[in-house]
Amino acid sequence: MNGFLVPHHLIDGGIVGIALLLHYFLKFPTGIIMVGLSIPICIFSSLNNKEYFFSSLQGLLVSSLFIDLLAPLRFQFFIPQLASALIGGAIIGVGVGLMLRYKTSTGGTDLLAEIISETFSLNIALVIILIDGVIVLAGLALLKLDAFLYSCIAIIAVGFITSLIKGK
């Protein structure tokens, strides 16, 4: 994320996307914002699946910590926007897919997507793309048009790679 999305002010969907928007415009640390926004989702998910709660809380804390620890690396190399959107989206998709495959998450909207997917027998990629799309669309008011379009490419990559890794 720091090496691919942040240098171009691209966003992902979900809690990460909201955290990135707040980071870009308010300069708050992305990982701390993620924790603050995700805890209510973790608590909600514990009502449906207690096993997810503890593993998701752990995934949330570890991923948020690493996002903030790796923040100084964000401008160490330059990759064009299209490649950044595709690579960044693919990397995020691998992470989300692996977490969901092994019944954990970062506690964000991917956890909500998993619950919706299982409840309504929907493809997880479709649910993730829809949730992420709403958040990226909301970011249109704050992003430049090119950043918005490349962010759309990134969320499509996240959804498809997540689906490939997680299965079903």
Image (cartoon, grey):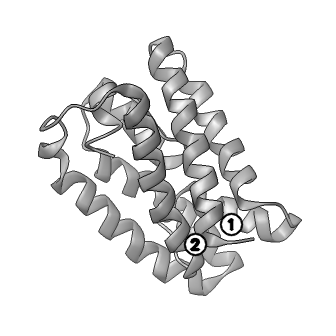
Query: From what the image shows, is residue 158 above or below residue 78?
Result: below
Q: Is residue 130 left or right of residue 45?
A: right
At x 43%, y 29%, the residue is: 82
**SS type, badge 1:** helix
Q: Residues within 10 Å of mark 1 (few under 14, many from 20)?
A: many
Q: Tell which circle, 1 or 2, labels the residue nearer the N-terminal end.
A: 2
State the image quarter where residue 23 is shown: top left
Q: Mark 1 — residue?
A: 114
Marker disc for residue 100: 2
Q: Amino acid at mark 1?
A: Glu
Q: Amino acid at mark 2?
A: Leu
In this rendered view, identify the residue nearer to me: 102 or 68: 102
Q: Position of residue 42 (x, y in %)?
A: 54, 68
Q: Is residue 75 left or right of residue 147?
A: left
Q: Are marks 1 and 2 in contact (CB under 8 Å)?
A: yes
At x 37%, y 36%, the residue is: 84
Q: CA distance from mark 1 to mark 2?
A: 8 Å
State the image quarter where residue 20 is shown: top left
Query: From what the image shows, is residue 68 above or below residue 28?
Result: below
Quarter of the image with the C terminus in it: bottom right
Q: Position of residue 93 (x, y in %)?
A: 51, 56
In this rendered view, identify the residue nearer to me: 18 or 149: 149
Q: Is residue 129 left or right of residue 11?
A: right
